[in-house]
Amino acid sequence: MKSLLLSCALAATAFGSFTGCAVDEQYSQTALNALQTREFDYAFDPTFDATVGALFDLGYTIRTSDKRGGFLSAVSQNGLVQIKLDQAGPKRTSVRVSTGARGQTRVNKELIDEILNTIDRRLTSSNIPRSS
């Protein structure tokens, strides 16, 4: 029985080294804010609409949508995404993206960048004038 347990433990260790076990990177609060938040030179309504469109473009299913409160939550095979939009001025909107997987908050820099870049593309390709 001991040799079976030892064999299983060794196999699990070997498998982990081949799959490259990911370790969560630690961020300072300032770095995390910079990573998760981007401001867009567009009013709140078109930015919210572009965010909804970006989530659909990326294959997300929206679970919660509260335009008045500026909150969206969505899920896909990549996990859970929560987005908070705040009006930062008459024609400026702040968007903060949080990611999670398996019920845990996980910072996924690549996914956050992909979402924010898709929002930016939707806004810049629209006929909505960028504020000056």
Image (tube, helix red, strand yellow):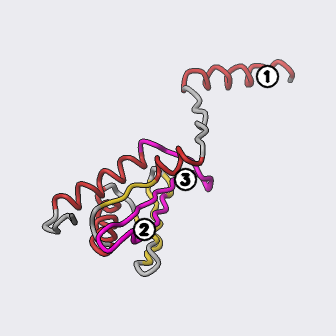
Left or right of residue 16, residue 50 in this image: left
Mark 3 vs 2, N-terminal side: 2
Q: For the residue marked with disc 3, what is the amino acid?
A: Gly
Query: Residue 9's x, y, as percent?
Result: 74, 24
> What secondary structure is the stretch in magenta mostly built from?
strand
- Alpha carbon distance from label 2 to label 1: 53 Å
Name the spot of residue 17 as percent of width and height, x first: 60, 21
| Distance between the alpha carbons at the discs numbered 1 and 3 | 35 Å
Q: What separation in Å lies between label 3 and label 2 (alpha carbons)? A: 18 Å
Assess disc 1: are there few (<14), some (14-19) or many (≥20) residues with their C-alpha within 10 Å of its C-alpha.
Answer: few
Q: How many marks?
A: 3
- The residue segment tinted magenta is 81-110
Near-viewer residue (2 or 110): 110
Do the residues bearing badges 2 and 1 touch, measured as CB atoms within 8 Å? no
- Identify the residue position indicated by label 3 in the image: 100
User: For residue 85, which numbered disc appears in the image?
Assistant: 2
Question: Which residue is at a point 35% across and 61% down the rendered structure image?
Answer: 55
Judged from this view, the residue extending furthest toward the left is 127
Name the amino acid type tagged 2: Leu
**Which amino acid type is shown beneath numbered disc 1?**
Leu
